[in-house]
């Protein structure tokens, strides 16, 4: 693992590193769409996230404690910040999913995130997009947000509840940009990216299992735990690919480009809904999905 980590650090900022970052960001997008589908509807979002994080702790602990080096003092403070940022994001997402449908919340979060991330990457990492790349960002974020608008028009929720869900979703999109920028900074400070990843997944996953356990005990009719536990295991494995992939992509190449490519998860999510969950797509949604994919291609080719 040390040799692999050293090789990844050596190709950071090179054309080879950029190509690998593109692959990782797209694989992360597919994994994130699967991750989102796992959280869709069947269980309370707090319990689902708690089950996923419990498995993340269990699976990451042996690697963090016995395989990779222990973090130094600087990395400890960075990881403490990551705990705060990711806890805020997870709470925000759970509150959004409580109040609005997955098909409303997910596009709002994913459409807001890349736009803010590109701006943050410009400020903190001196990354600058070309005018053509900004056109791509506009296509991608605009297509995702228009998907949300279309989905909102089909909702029959109480208007006040829907507005609260949208506000929490917008806050979630802002926090996506915050954690993407912060995590990119953190993984770049680690001599070995795998050290950061192992400890990141270990320490940021302690909180929600405790919240989920507290919530479970207070339920008048709690769900059967068996299926939830298995869903949590699958979610944890997918999370390693999804979040680990995009983190590694930000280590190898530009943070903004990785963030934009990762949001093609909306397209993958739509195809999962179409072919696996039996949801209708329709011509307008298909057009918007094409717009999202086109935006990602423009960002990648316009640099």
Image (tube, rainbow, N blue to C red):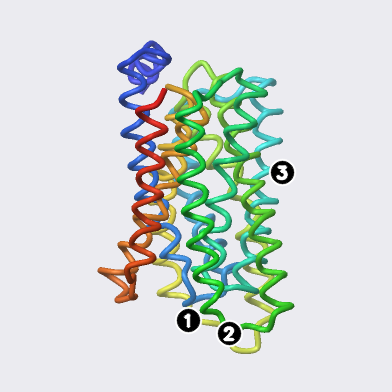
Give the quadrant of residue 171.
bottom right
Image height check: is 242 above or below 73?
below
Under circle 1, the secondary element is loop
Under circle 3, the secondary element is helix
Q: Which mark is on residue 84? A: 3
**Residue 175 at x, y = what percent?**
66, 46
- What whole-number distance in Å separates the C-alpha atoms at marks 3 and 1? 30 Å
Q: Quadrant of the N terminus?
A: top left
In-front residue for pair 277/91: 277
Front position among marks 3 and 1: 3
Q: Which of the two discs, 3 and 1, labels the residue nearer the N terminus?
A: 3
Image height check: is 202 above or below 233?
above
**Residue 276 at x, y = what percent?**
27, 70
- For image coordinates 52% across by 66% down, the residue present is 48
Front position among marks 2 and 3: 2
Q: Which mark is on residue 224? A: 1
Q: Which mark is on residue 113? A: none
**Residue 107 at x, y = what percent?**
51, 59
- What whole-number distance in Å separates the C-alpha atoms at marks 2 and 1? 29 Å
Mark 2, residue position: 156
Q: Which of the two discs, 2 and 3, labels the residue nearer the N terminus?
A: 3
**Mark 2 crowd level (few <14, some 14–19, many ≥20, 10 Å Cα):** few
Q: Is residue 154 left or right of residue 265?
A: right
Under circle 2, the secondary element is loop
**Residue 167 at x, y = what percent?**
71, 62
């Amino acid at each position: 693992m040390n040799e692999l980590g050293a090789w990844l650090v050596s190709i950071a900022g090179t054309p080879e590193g950029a190509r690998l970052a593109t692959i990782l960001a797209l694989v992360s997008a597919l994994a994130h769409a699967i991750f989102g589908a796992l959280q869709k509807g069947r269980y309370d979002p707090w319990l689902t996230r708690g089950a996923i994080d419990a498995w993340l702790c269990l699976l990451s602990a042996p690697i963090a404690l016995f395989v990779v080096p222990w973090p130094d003092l600087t990395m400890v403070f960075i990881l403490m910040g990551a705990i705060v940022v990711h806890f805020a994001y997870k709470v925000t997402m759970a509150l959004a999913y409580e109040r609005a449908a997955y098909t409303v919340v997910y596009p709002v979060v994913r459409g807001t995130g890349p736009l803010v991330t590109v701006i943050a990457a410009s400020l903190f990492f001196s990354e600058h997009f070309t005018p053509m790349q900004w056109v791509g960002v506009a296509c991608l974020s605009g297509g995702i947000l228009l998907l949300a608008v279309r989905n909102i028009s089909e909702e029959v929720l109480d208007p006040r509840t829907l507005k609260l869900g949208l506000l929490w979703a917008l806050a979630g999109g802002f926090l996506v940009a915050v954690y993407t920028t912060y995590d990119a900074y953190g993984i770049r400070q680690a001599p070995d990216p795998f050290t950061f990843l192992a400890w990141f997944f270990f320490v940021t996953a302690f909180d929600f299992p405790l919240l989920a356990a507290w919530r479970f005990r207070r339920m008048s009719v709690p769900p059967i735990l068996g299926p939830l536990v298995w869903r949590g295991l699958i979610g944890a494995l997918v999370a390693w690919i999804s979040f680990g992939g995009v983190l590694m992509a930000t280590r190898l190449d530009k943070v903004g480009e990785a963030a934009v490519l990762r949001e093609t998860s909306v397209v993958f999510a739509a195809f999962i809904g179409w072919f696996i969950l039996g949801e209708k797509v329709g011509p307008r949604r298909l057009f918007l999905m094409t717009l999202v994919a086109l935006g990602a291609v423009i960002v990648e080719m316009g640099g």
